[in-house]
Each structure stands twice: as structure tokens, then as C-alpha cells.
Image: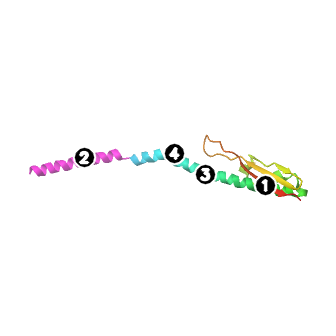
Amino acid sequence: MATTIATRATARVRTAVRSTKEQRDRGVSTLEFAGFLPVLLFVAMATIQLGIIGYAGSQAGTAARAAARTEAQEELRGQGEATGLAAISDWLADGASIPTVNNGDTVTATASIKIPSVIPGFNGFKDARHEVTMPAE
């Protein structure tokens, strides 16, 4: 009989300890997620930023080719920068410059596009640059 009472008492203590521990653990996963959320947001924004950098580089190549192709044609000389700016996305064209140089038998266009930042407080990106040389007509 004494063993039965001791067993019941031990079972009650274990149940009380278990339920107290479960109550203390409630909400822990929410706190862990809240603590890890800034890291997830930073990784997501860095991934988007890398995509923007690649896109700006691609747009610089497109702008330089369009400007050089236009400047290479004798009847369209002087319109290269306007053509290059028209060839890129409007949201990147604001920070773009496309100077062209006519060397007589060749035309060189250098597109430089400012890379916008989506990471708050970080604007240390260099411009996306691309240079194209084409034979003049």
C-alpha cells in the first residue's frame, strides 16, 4: 500500500513538472522566429539587390550598343545618347549617361548607369559600365 501511495505521488509530481515545463516553453518558437526575421529580411533584400545589379549591367550593355549603332550611321550622328537612353528602363535612365566618341573610322559609346540600392543605408555601389566600339559608316 505504501508503494502505491508513493507511486501515485511520484506520478503527480512528474505531471506537475511536465505541465509547468510545457507552460514555460509556450511562445518560444514565436520568439525564435521574431529573432531570426531580421536575418531573413536581410538575405531577401540582398538577393533582390544582386538581381538589380545584374539587370543594371545588362541595361548598360544594351544602352551602349544602341548608342554606338546609332552614332555609327552618318545620317544619325548626334542622336546616340538619346537612343541609348530610350533603350533602357525608365527607372534606370534617370542615373544614366552615355557619352559617344567618334574616332573617324570607329565610334565608341560608354554607358554608365547608377545602381539603385534597396538595402537601407547602403549606397556604396559603383556604376554599371559598358563600352562598345563599332565601325563608322
Residue type at mark 2?
Answer: Ala
Residue type at mark 1?
Answer: Val
Front position in the image: 83 or 124:
124
Residue type at mark 3?
Answer: Ile
First in residue order: circle 1 vs circle 4 = 4
Residue type at mark 4?
Answer: Pro
- The colour style of the image is rainbow
Q: Position of residue 97 (x, y in %)?
A: 78, 47
Query: What is the secondary structure assignment of the residue under circle 2?
Result: helix
Q: Residue 117 appears in which quarter of the rendering?
A: top right
Magenta stretch, residue numbers:
1-26
First in residue order: circle 3 vs circle 1 = 3
- Determine whether label 2 and label 4 are within 8 Å by CB: no
**Residue identified by numbered label 3:** 48
**Residue identified by numbered label 2:** 16
Name which residue lies at 74% across and 55% down. 61
Q: CA distance from mark 3 to mark 4?
A: 15 Å
Q: CA distance from mark 1 to mark 4?
A: 42 Å
Mark closer to the observer (1, 2): 1
Mark 4 residue crowding within 10 angstroms, few (<14) / some (14–19) / many (20+): few
First in residue order: circle 2 vs circle 3 = 2
Mark 1 residue crowding within 10 angstroms, few (<14) / some (14–19) / many (20+): some
**Residue identified by numbered label 1:** 132
Determine whether 135 is above or below 18 in the image: below
Name which residue lies at 32% across and 48% down. 22
Query: What is the secondary structure assignment of the residue under circle 4?
Result: helix
Q: CA distance from mark 3 to mark 1?
A: 28 Å
**Residue identified by numbered label 4:** 38
First in residue order: circle 3 vs circle 4 = 4
Q: Position of residue 76 (x, y in %)?
A: 88, 56
Does the magenta-highlighted stretch encompass residue 106?
A: no
